[in-house]
Image: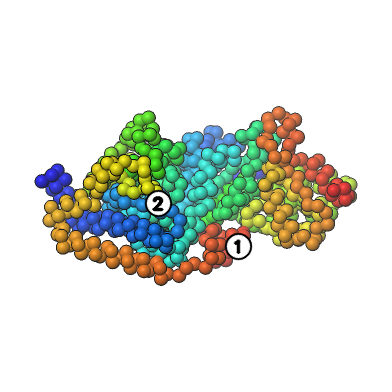
Amino acid sequence: MNDEIREGPPQDLTGEQLLGMYRRMRLIRAFENTAQRHFEAGEIAGFLHLSQGQEAVPVGTCTALRRDDYITSTHRGHGDVIAKGCDVKYMFAELYGRTSGYCKGKGGSMHIADFSQGIIGANGIVSGGLPISTGVGLSIKMRGTDQVAVCFFGEGATAEGGFHEALNLASLWQIPVIFVCQNNLYALSHPWDKTAYQCELEHRAATYHMPADCVDGMDAVAVYRAVRKAVDHARAGGGPSFVEAKTYRFLGHYVGDPALYMPAEERQAWHKRDAILKLGRQLRAWGYLTEEKDAQMATDVEAELAAAIEFAKSSPIPAPEEALDDLCVHFDYLGHPLQGEKRS
Amino acid sequence: MREITYRDALKEALREEMIRDERVFLMGEDIADPFGSAYKVTLGLSPEFGTDRVLQTPISEQGFVGAGVGAAITGMRPVVELMYIDFVTMAMDQIANQAAKIRYMSGGQAKVPLVIRTQGGPGRSSAAQHAQSLEAWFLHIPGLLVAMPSTPYDAKGLLKTAIRLDDPVMFIEQKLLYNTTGPVPEGEYTLPFGVADVKREGTDCTVVATSMAVVKALRAAELLEQEGISVEVVDPRTLFPLDIDTIVQSVQKTSRLVVTHEAPERGGFAAEVVAQIADKAFGYIDAPIQRVCAPSVPPPFARNMEDFIMVDEKKIADRVRKLVRGEI
């Protein structure tokens, strides 16, 4: 029996929760694979930044969150928003550019948002969500609730000015934000160890006097525990925390990138550490999962995605002139007042 | 009616809206007492409302403008002060890619009740990084509203409206206007966005002017009146939404148009007004449409060079005179 199983089932998560995490990770993986197939078939336009390999980070993180907590995400955000609660049906509708999509076809893959459950947007600008999450934390503190904000970002964002400004302000104001860095080792093609002279992120967090944890991003339970600790700390008024999850992007930067800069041995080594396979082994060893249940789950997930694709494809295509809507609350795109919107 | 300064009119607007709505808060560099902000608009507000609601920030424009965006989309109504409009470059992603686009990108889910107060303009030998007029940048970004008040009355009424709107507003003041005075009623009032104000009626030529250029256009109109030339001065007050109808009506009366602002001529707000008038009122125009703007160079430091590039009443009056006399 190896270490991952010898530890025994975690006492802080129920079997149901663990199975839920496992299912959500599989849903993300299958979503990404399905999106890739339909993109390659020419059915989905634009860019597709996929996150196969990173599933344990958003799922471990969001297991520690409530529905009314907030997340900001990135251009590689499908997994983050599914983990927080997005329905794959409306996500595919968005990827297909349909009116039933989360953003009515105006956002696409990089901008999925569902404000009703605190998903205030994936972001096409690297580090764009960092200052925003600081403002969300400030708003929580000013409104006096016990919500928290999680800011997902990649290690590539840590070389941006916005990263440093956001961490500095979050620390200065002691606001309830958890900065979750999904360190997948590559910013497009640029390797992590060429990002800074000193790359260990806990040193960065220490600069801003922030509790920091570096966890195995291929271990969903470990991610959950680190984030849970940070969330409890934030809810209790303890201020911001930093969690670095070391993970890996199994594929290239976007669909179509052959990722020649990722060495074959490195890729093979990380595939062996696949977080979904690991959690599956653990769940079986702990008696929560049978081969039969596992197969049934795979069938269910595929059925959910097939239904989602069907929903997307059969959803209405927006009228082209809908491009002119949804710009401002009070005025149309020409500046004419819109009726029926009362000022707050 | 009482007369107060442009500065005090703005301060009253902030104060009244903070009393009216506890979600309104101020954020920016050096805004708390005893310094009370670079141009003293917020002086006296931190003792009254506390430093949680008059939140002074470090020099971190991207950070605190972004924080304003995040707070605005989650239930607060921040009024962020950018000390100089020139510093907006440090925060441009949060304004142009985030605040302006979050509602659109999310298919109309988000509201962004964010006001960014800032000031620009030449006239104090502040040179190329403290005296620019960058309003055209924001005019060009769909999703932002742009206000440029020229009087204390407009400043107060428009700022109160800006704070109550659910869209992001660039509220652009002018550093030489803060000490100007004008009538402002004691009681509550707001002014709508997208409604121009005819600052002076006339029949021979329409001058569309913004911000400090309104003051100068009005002085030019007085000079020209002595020569028997009647000038109508129209202040759009908000650049977007733009009340083009009032400008069209004015041009229908005067058949001549001059547009003036302190920003460089090339690609400026005046070009937009000229294009819209060419489209909507071409048949009414009897003389070449003119722009009186800064030449397209950065604001220089030396007093005489700065004067040379600045719009003033003489430059406006000279152009209008030539236009009316048929010399252009």
Sequence-earlier tag: 1 or 2: 2
Q: Amino acid at mark 1?
A: Pro
Q: Relative to the observer, which residue lies in front, A92 or B135?
A: A92
Q: Nearer the viewer, residue A325 or A64?
A: A325
The residue drawn where x is 81% and y is 40% is: B314
Q: Is A94 above or below relative to A235?
A: below
Q: In the picture, residue B245 is in which quadrant?
A: bottom right
User: From the viewer's perspective, is residue B15 above or below residue A100?
Assistant: above
- Tag in front: 1 or 2: 2
Give, as a three-letter code, the residue at label 2.
Gly
Which residue is painted at 33% across and 47% down in the image? A249
Give the CA distance from mark 1 to mark 2. 44 Å
Q: Is residue A8 visible?
A: yes
Q: Is residue A243 visible?
A: no
Q: Say which chain tag 1 marks.
A: A
Left or right of A85, for residue B228: right
Query: Which type of secondary structure does the marked residue at label 1 adopt?
Result: loop
Do the numbered discs 1 and 2 sit on residues whose CB atoms are within 8 Å? no
Residue corresponding to mark 1 = A337
Task: Say which quarter of the image contains residue A216.
Answer: top left
Instruction: Pinpoint residue B227: horizontal percent, then vertical percent.
Output: 89, 47
**On what subunit does the disc labeled 2 rest?**
A
User: At 85% across and 48% down in the image, what residue appears?
Assistant: B328
Rendering coords of residue A116 (x, y %): 39, 59
Same chain for the residues under marks 1 and 2 in the image: yes
Is A105 displayed left or right of A290 in the figure? right
As drawn, the label of residue A256 is 2
